[in-house]
Amino acid sequence: MAENRPPDPGRRSERSRRAIYDAALGLVGEAGYPRTTIEAIAARAGVGKQTIYRWWPSKAAVLMEAFIDLGNRAAEQAGEAAYAIPDTGDLAADLRTVLRATVDELNDPVTEAPTRALAAEGIVDAALGAEFVEKLLEPQLQLYVTRLRAAQEAGDVRADIDPRIALELLVAPLTHRWLLRTRPLTHAYADALVDYTLHGLAAR
């Protein structure tokens, strides 16, 4: 005879939370951030809007957590290598690899819409902007710092350079082109950024 067990609130909450994440990401991708509402997220997730308000103070907070969860799941599927820039001994090749992967991610409809929404909302909401930097941007920037410091120790990069400034030569132009849509975001552009950063603009 099957044992009758009471429903597990934790499992039910996790199922609801996952449904809310998926609903928020889906709606932002389909309708855009301005048209995404708590009510719409709740309806798609099959929960009451009070459930969402009990867990999050705003739709931006929902989207932030959903996007972090999306990244964590992608990293788990990719394995530990997702948490580090490869160190093959060839700095240029390693940087091209990670910048090309970043181009692919920024061009992916699944991640493009929520990333744009969070970046834009973070400009007008200082608290959200700080959270965006702390939880999403800073961990990625630290990967560059780690790889560039390893290159310094190997003698491949000048010992006096500041890795934080150096990494901005790579990621800032990429972000600028993507945010403002000034030109197409391509692998060729990523490769050019690596070349310009490592070799400069002076005549050779």
Image (cartoon, rainbow, N blue to C red):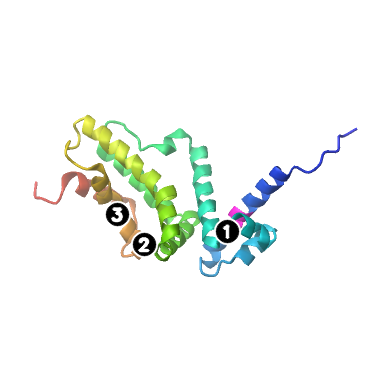
Give the residue number, with chain letter if any, for mark 2. 179
Label 1: which secondary element: helix
Label 3: which secondary element: helix
Residue in the image at 25% along x and 42% along y: 163
Give the residue number, with chain letter if any, for mark 3. 172
Overall secondary structure of the magenta stretch? Answer: helix
Residue 101: % across, % down: 39, 46
The reply to whether the C-beta atoms of the residues labelled 1 and 3 are less than 8 Å apart is no
Residue in the image at 41% along x and 66% along y: 124
Residue 10: % across, % down: 69, 43
Residue in the image at 31% along x and 31% along y: 88
Say which label, 1 or 2, has the lower sequence index. Answer: 1
Tell me the magenta residue range: 20-25
The reply to whether the C-beta atoms of the residues labelled 1 and 2 are less than 8 Å apart is no
Which is more toward the observer, 42 or 32? Answer: 42
Give the residue number, with chain letter if any, for mark 1. 24
- Residue 177 can be seen, yes or no: yes
- Relative side of 34 to 4, left or right: left
Residue 146: % across, % down: 31, 37
Three-letter residue code for mark 3: Ala
Three-letter residue code for mark 2: Leu
Circle 2 Cα neighbour tier, 10 Å, few/some/many (<14 / 14–19 / ≥20): some
Three-letter residue code for mark 1: Ala
Residue 182 is inside the magenta segment: no
- Relative side of 150 to 100, left or right: left
